[in-house]
Amino acid sequence: MTEATRRHVPVLSQDVIRYLDVSEGGTYLDCTLGFAGHASQIARLLGARGHLIGFDRDPQALELASRRLDALRDELGNAMPAVTLIGEPFSKAAEHVEAGSLDGLLADFGVSSMQLDQAERGFSFQVDGPLDMRQDTRQVLTAAQVVNEMDERELANLIYEYGEERRSWRIARAIVRARPITTTGQLARIVAGCAPSMKSERIHPATRTFQALRIHVNRELDEIRQLLEAAPSLLKPSGHLVVISFHSLEDRIAKDVLREQAAKGEWTILTRKPVVADEAETNQNPRARSAKLRAAEKIDPKQGRGERSEYKDPGSGRMLTGFSRLAQKEAGSRKRPQKGK
């Protein structure tokens, strides 16, 4: 296990466990293994009769997750659940997971910290590397091909739609004039040169452009929608779905699809508003600042629809986050929704 793996802290970790309602002997799917941070926490609660299924289309991430779970198996011994790892996009979950077999499904969308930290993966403008951005390094399309081959109009539309960047035409024009562009650092300088940050912004001027390219290269929004549309068929009655998003496009899809499915009688929404990290967690893990968690419970047709209480601190009415929950010492300071009510 690498030092980075040991230091990795999964976002909203305690909230994930709570909203998944992880139970011993259950079957749970982690659609975005990454460093297996969330998966390891789930595995500790499943016991020998449990089953953990993990997806990741990044071969390197799958290998690292496998090593971490092997180390956990050495630690837990006979208490380790069965583990199945699948190196495919999570949009293909329905092809590999039996319908109605899951007690819980987790998806932590977006780029992983491992991918951001490795210059050769080309995800970050913080370190100079090749313009790659592929989560699955086996696929053909790279960010370099998009930047250097797409026409100006298409590039501007892509940056506007996926990056929500109002200055997309100016950026696309500067990119086309500067071709060929081969590195993340070169692209970041071009964007910053033509569209510098405004005083009210705290992000790097290239952030939205990089986001747009990454989403396009990996078909991220299509992947999310396909997974969410398949999720109800994969879960058992009263099974729980938990999704974590990191920007508005992801969260909007999650919110809209869950509401559409809830209107059809497939879900009870457990989070009227997304759960976010508190100050303690964001201080330790800055990536958690933009994380939003939404959760839902599959309606049991035998019991019908019903209201579910949200997880709140009875004293303040504020949704508890993982770090807040860890700080609570009294057993009665938190509520859990009961299945079937």
Image (cartoon, rainbow, N blue to C red):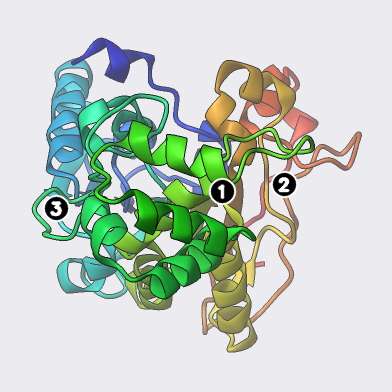
**Residue wearing tag 2:** 311
Residue sitting nearer the eye, 172 or 30: 172
Percent x, y of residue 289: 63, 34
Element at label 1: helix
Percent x, y of residue 28: 33, 52
**Residue wearing tag 1:** 19
Q: How many marks?
A: 3
Element at label 3: strand
The picture quadrant where one finds residue 230 is bottom left
Q: Residues within 10 Å of mark 1 (few under 14, many from 20)?
A: many
- The quadrant of the rendering that contains the N terminus is top left
Q: Which is more foreground, mark 3 or mark 1?
A: 3
Q: Residue at x 59, y 49 (%)?
A: 293
The picture quadrant where one finds residue 94 is bottom left
Percent x, y of residue 226: 36, 74
Task: Determine whether 56 is above or below 70 in the image.
Answer: below
Residue sitting nearer the eye, 49 or 216: 216
Q: Which mark is residue 85?
A: none
Circle 1: residue type:
Tyr
The picture quadrant where one finds residue 158 is bottom left
Q: Earlier in the sequence, mark 1 or mark 2?
A: 1
Circle 3: residue type:
Ile
Q: Residue furthest bottom?
A: 264
Percent x, y of residue 130: 22, 37
**Residue wearing tag 3:** 86
- In the visual, does 273 lie left or right of 88? right
- In the visual, does 70 lie left or right of 219? left
- What separation in Å lies between label 2 and label 3 (alpha carbons)? 32 Å
